[in-house]
Amino acid sequence: MDGFTLFGSATENEEEVMSKVCLDTYCNYSNAIKKIRGALRPLFLCFV
């Protein structure tokens, strides 16, 4: 019974950590895209 409870709580923690990691990765990814867009915008203006 204790083993099952430990396993259940461990699984919940893993899901929580994974969702946080995914969220952090998404935030970093979107920030990187914004920076790249900001850096490329002058180039596009030159071509247009």
Image (cartoon, rainbow, N blue to C red):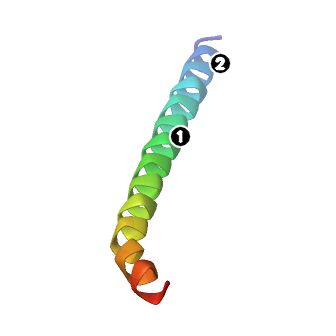
Coordinates of residue 8 in the picture (x, y in percent): 62, 21
Kindly give the residue lying farthest to the top in the view shown. Answer: 1
Amino acid of disc 1? Met
Estimate how packed mark 1 is, as few (under 14), some (14 to 19) or many (20 or more) residues with alpha carbons within 10 Å: few
Q: Residue at x 51, y 27 (%)?
A: 13
Coordinates of residue 42 in the picture (x, y in percent): 35, 77
Left or right of 4 on screen, residue 41: left
Kindly give the residue lying farthest to the front in the view shown. Answer: 48
Residues 18 and 35: in front is 35
Vertical placement of 26 versus 33: above or below?
above
Q: Which mark is residue 40?
A: none
Left or right of 43 on screen, residue 16: right
Query: Which residue is identified by label 1?
Result: 18
Q: Is mark 1 on a helix, strand or loop?
A: helix
Q: What element carries label 2?
A: helix
Residues 2 and 17: in front is 17
Pointer 1 or 2: first along the chain: 2
Q: Which residue is drawn at 46% across and 57% down?
A: 29
Of circles 1 and 2, the one toward us is: 1
Estimate how packed mark 2 is, as few (under 14), some (14 to 19) or many (20 or more) residues with alpha carbons within 10 Å: few
Vertical placement of 6 versus 43: above or below?
above
Q: In what quadrant of the picture does the N terminus appear?
A: top right
Query: Which residue is identified by label 2?
Result: 4
Between marks 1 and 2, how big is the CA–CA gap?
21 Å
Residues 9 and 28: in front is 28
Q: Residue at x 47, y 54 (%)?
A: 30
Vertical placement of 46 versus 27: above or below?
below
Q: Which residue is drawn at 42% across and 78% down?
A: 45
Amino acid of disc 2? Phe
Left or right of 2 on screen, residue 35: left
